[in-house]
Image (cartoon, grey):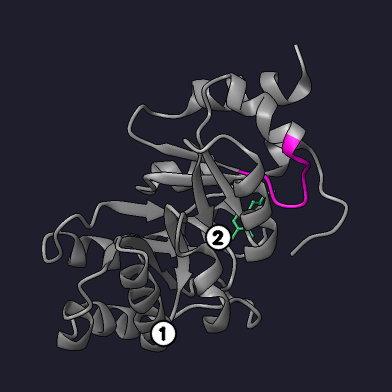
């Protein structure tokens, strides 16, 4: 059995049934994706629109493509025909553009709003207050070709379990505040290779795992 297949199977065995695994394939070749695909994996995550688009063109069409990276407004059009879920939305301007491009493609696009939970300054995302205000705003409810499905967050890169839990609790409480107010709001995307077990215990419904499945990446972004 290949390393990819055995890693994937051992991670899947640890995940509760209602947690969705996004296999993060950024920087990895299509052949790696196909190995995972052959085991039944259908959700894959990429952080660059151009790379995701060329993989989409080449690979089976029943793959759910997740854009997990920061999105530039002028590139939304390239993924609008096919993207399954955009994880890192953090402005009204971006939501408006996603709505516009979704409409052009005669479809709805699922989005998560990114919340900044990590201590580091470099991470993108909104404060919980700004995210709640944005999601509940009348302007957003008028965007008829987007569905806001939940929240996404990246915790600090640390093995301090107490800190990880407290960061995940911040986003979980915003998620709980919103989930009964918005139709279809059911996704909490937290947890990566280093912290996914804790993220699940703290209420995550979707984990984004790359290096523990596909091995270390040569460059990281
Ligand atoms: C790369 C990346 C991941 C996966 O990271 P691993 O540590 O390799 O599991 C998850 N989420 C985001 C936003 C990423 O950019």
For the residues bearing labels 2 and 1, Cβ distance under 8 angstroms: no
Q: Is residue 50 visible in the rendered structure shown here?
A: yes
Report which residue position mark 1 lands on. Answer: 91
The label on residue 63 is none
Region in magenta = 24-30
Give the residue drawn at x 31%, y 71%. Answer: 103
Question: In front: 220, or 105?
Answer: 105
Q: Is residue 194 visible in the rendered structure shown here?
A: no
| Residue 154 placement, left or right of 121 | left
Q: Does the stretch in magenta take in 174?
A: no
Q: Report the number of numbered marks.
A: 2
Ligand 1 under 8 Å from disc 1 Cβ: no
| Residue 104 placement, left or right of 56 | left
Q: Is residue 167 above or below residue 27?
A: below
**How many residues crowd around disc 1 within 10 Å: few (fewer than 14), some, or many (20 or more)?**
some
Give the residue drawn at x 77%, y 51%. Answer: 27
Q: Is residue 96 above or below residue 27?
A: below
Question: In front: 117, or 104?
Answer: 104
**How many residues crowd around disc 2 within 10 Å: few (fewer than 14), some, or many (20 or more)?**
many
Q: Which quadrant of the figure has residue 81?
A: bottom left
> Residue 7, image x and y in percent?
68, 25
Give the residue drawn at x 60%, y 76%. Answer: 123
Give the residue drawn at x 58%, y 19%. Answer: 39
Identify the residue at the far right of this view.
218
Report which residue position mark 2 lands on. Answer: 68
Cα distance, mark 2 to mark 1?
15 Å
> Residue 144, image x and y in percent?
20, 72
Q: Which quadrant of the figure has residue 185?
A: bottom left
Quadrant containing the N terminus is top right
């Amino acid at each position: 059995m290949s390393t990819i297949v055995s890693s994937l199977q051992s991670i899947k065995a640890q995940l509760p049934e209602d947690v969705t695994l996004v296999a993060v394939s950024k920087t990895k070749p299509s052949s790696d994706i196909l190995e995972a695909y052959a085991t039944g994996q259908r959700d894959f995550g990429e952080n660059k629109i151009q790379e995701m688009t060329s993989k989409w063109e080449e690979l089976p069409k029943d793959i759910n493509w997740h854009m997990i990276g920061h999105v530039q407004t002028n590139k939304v059009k390239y993924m609008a025909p096919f993207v399954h879920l955009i994880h890192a939305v953090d402005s009204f301007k971006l939501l408006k553009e996603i709505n516009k491009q979704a409409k052009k493609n005669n479809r709805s696009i699922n989005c998560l709003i990114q919340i900044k939970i990590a201590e580091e300054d470099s991470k993108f995302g909104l404060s919980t207050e700004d995210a709640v205000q944005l999601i509940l705003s009348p302007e957003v409810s008028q965007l008829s070709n987007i569905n806001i499905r939940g929240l996404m967050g990246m915790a600090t890169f640390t093995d301090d379990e107490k800190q990880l839990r407290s960061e995940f609790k911040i986003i979980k409480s915003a998620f709980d505040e919103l989930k009964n107010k918005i139709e279809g709001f059911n996704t909490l995307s937290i947890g990566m290779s280093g912290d996914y077990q804790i993220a699940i215990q703290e209420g995550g419904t979707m984990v984004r795992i790359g290096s523990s499945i596909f091995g270390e990446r040569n460059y990281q972004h």
